[in-house]
Image (tube, rainbow, N blue to C red):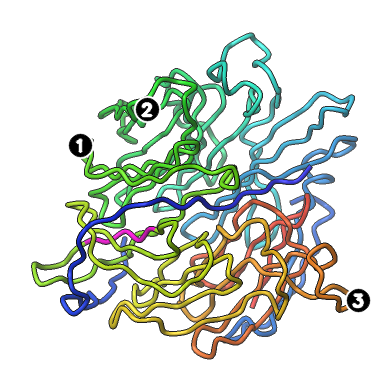
């Protein structure tokens, strides 16, 4: 069994504002166990000679003695670069052992496990106490019991939150592992969570097809947003706050729809496209500009999305109006990400390239082949694309040649490749990182964290 997560696309068409009306607004900063082996790495300016600092073997360190496969399912890194949160599952239909689920915290400096926050079951049908945690149409799709579906940290790194299959959001002290609060109110399992940039509000998306906004200080519900469907008609995939905290995005899986809301819970615009069978399991790609783009009317917060015509569209998050369309890809676009300073937008496409777009000129700046000359099918993810905190390195899903140097999709292992965005050259390839769990840079820019099977690899530059 493997996780395969990729990206959706969606369609929207509105009149464009001339690209000449745009200028960039300068970015400003906002607010393991005994088997772990530590390797000291020299501090280098680039990732060209990255070294594997240590590995976390979940099978031996979290599920010792298990005979069932172990799968990491979610991962989050604290904003202070000190703590790694990992949820994982040990189960398989044919496995005789009781299926289990955990959420653990790890010290990123030492690789040692610091806390086990969740240790329970991962059931396929209903929870052990008989609670119905998913609508009837979803019981064969999602695991139930004590499963962690989403993880995030508060901006100060002091609190970690998890969206749970038991219909709750749980909060813990990220330093001590002590339970802080449980947020209860959803009818079904919570699959997506996000915390506002000011750390005051938590958004949770549930299979009851509502998004709730919670006061993190009191645990009270500030408002509930209805997605306009009945439970079981769709599955919520993502919720996310804009960098200024004034807008919110919710993404549905089956209807392939992204809804843009203002912070008062009023819908701004829905963007969607018709589903196709090949879209199954993909994520809808979108990215918020980190600091905003200055239009003639003033500073405007922007969200980037994609269309099935292989174009990228920039939208005003306050009004929902389309700002500009970027064209150049000849294959479906499966991932978008902005550089931390907001000057560059990167897009990952099934045409085998990553393109870099200047947000100053709104023109294509560079095209980088990501499959090392291989012309076969792309990796099965493509929603994994990430800038390093200094904006100089871009991590992307890629294919690398097999040991036989045969350009075959079946023989070529999947990998993550790091690119120097100034030169477009590949700095480093991490082979065999076959997992649907997204990779991460730590905020201090010193570590790169990715999943390989049941092992988490921590690389240091």
**Relative side of 439 to 296, left or right:** right
Q: How far apart, in angstroms, are the residues tagged by discs 3 and 1?
A: 56 Å
- Say which residue appears at 78% left-offset and 35% top-offset: 90
| Earlier-in-chain disc, 2 versus 3 | 2
Q: How far apart, in angstroms, are the residues tagged by discs 2 and 1?
A: 13 Å
Q: How far apart, in angstroms, are the residues tagged by discs 2 and 3?
A: 51 Å
| Earlier-in-chain disc, 2 versus 1 | 2
Front-most of 277 and 297?
277
The span shown in magenta is 301-305
List the residue tagged with mark 3. Answer: 404
Q: Is residue 273 above or below residue 95?
A: below
Q: For the residue labelled by badge 1, is the local secondary structure a helix, a strand or a loop?
A: loop
**Relative side of 283 to 295, left or right:** right
Q: Is residue 304 magenta?
A: yes
- Say which residue appears at 82% left-offset and 69% top-offset: 408
Q: What numbered label is drawn on residue 210?
A: 2
């Amino acid at each position: 069994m493997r996780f395969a997560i990729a990206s959706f696309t969606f369609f929207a068409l509105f009149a464009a504002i001339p690209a000449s009306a745009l200028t960039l607004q300068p970015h400003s900063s906002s607010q393991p166990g005994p088997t772990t082996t530590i390797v000291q790495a020299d501090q280098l300016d680039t990732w060209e000679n990255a070294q594997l600092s240590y590995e976390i073997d979940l099978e031996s360190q979290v599920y010792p003695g298990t005979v069932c496969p172990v799968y990491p399912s979610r991962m989050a890194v604290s904003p202070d670069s000190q703590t790694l949160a990992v949820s994982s599952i040990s189960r398989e239909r044919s496995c005789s052992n009781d299926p289990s689920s955990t959420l653990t915290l790890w010290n990123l400096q030492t690789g040692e496990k610091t806390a086990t926050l969740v240790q329970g079951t991962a059931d396929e049908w209903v929870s052990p106490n008989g609670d119905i945690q998913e609508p009837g149409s979803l019981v064969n799709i999602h695991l139930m019991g004590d499963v962690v579906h989403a993880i995030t940290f508060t901006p100060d790194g002091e609190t970690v939150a998890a969206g749970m299959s038991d219909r709750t959001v749980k909060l813990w002290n990220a330093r001590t592992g002590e339970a802080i609060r449980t947020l209860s109110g959803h009818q079904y399992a919570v699959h997506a969570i996000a915390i506002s940039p000011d750390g005051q509000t938590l958004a949770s998306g549930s299979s009851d097809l509502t998004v709730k906004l919670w006061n993190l200080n009191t645990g009270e519900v500030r408002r509930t947003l209805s997605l306009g469907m009945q439970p079981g008609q769709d599955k919520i995939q993502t919720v996310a706050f804009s960098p200024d905290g004034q807008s919110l995005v919710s993404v549905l899986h089956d209807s392939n729809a992204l809804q843009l809301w203002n912070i008062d819970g009023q819908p701004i615009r829905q963007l969607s496209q018709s589903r196709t069978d090949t879209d199954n399991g993909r994520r809808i790609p979108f990215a918020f500009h980190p600091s905003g783009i200055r239009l003639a009317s003033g500073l405007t917060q922007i969200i980037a999305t994609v269309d099935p015509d292989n174009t990228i569209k920039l939208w005003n998050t306050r009004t929902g109006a389309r700002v500009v369309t970027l064209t150049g890809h000849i294959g479906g676009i499966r991932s978008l990400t902005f550089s931390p300073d907001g000057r560059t937008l990167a897009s990952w496409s099934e045409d085998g390239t990553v393109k870099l777009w200047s947000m100053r000129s709104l023109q294509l700046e560079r095209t980088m082949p990501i499959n090392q000359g291989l012309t076969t099918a792309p990796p099965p993810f493509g929603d994994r694309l990430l800038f390093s905190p200094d904006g100089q390195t871009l991590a992307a899903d890629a294919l690398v040649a097999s040991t036989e140097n045969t350009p075959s999709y079946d023989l070529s292992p999947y990998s993550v490749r790091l690119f120097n965005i100034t030169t477009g050259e590949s700095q480093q390839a991490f082979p065999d990182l076959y997992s649907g769990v997204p990779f991460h840079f730590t905020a201090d820019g010193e570590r790169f964290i990715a999943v390989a099977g049941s092992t988490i690899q921590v690389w240091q530059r």
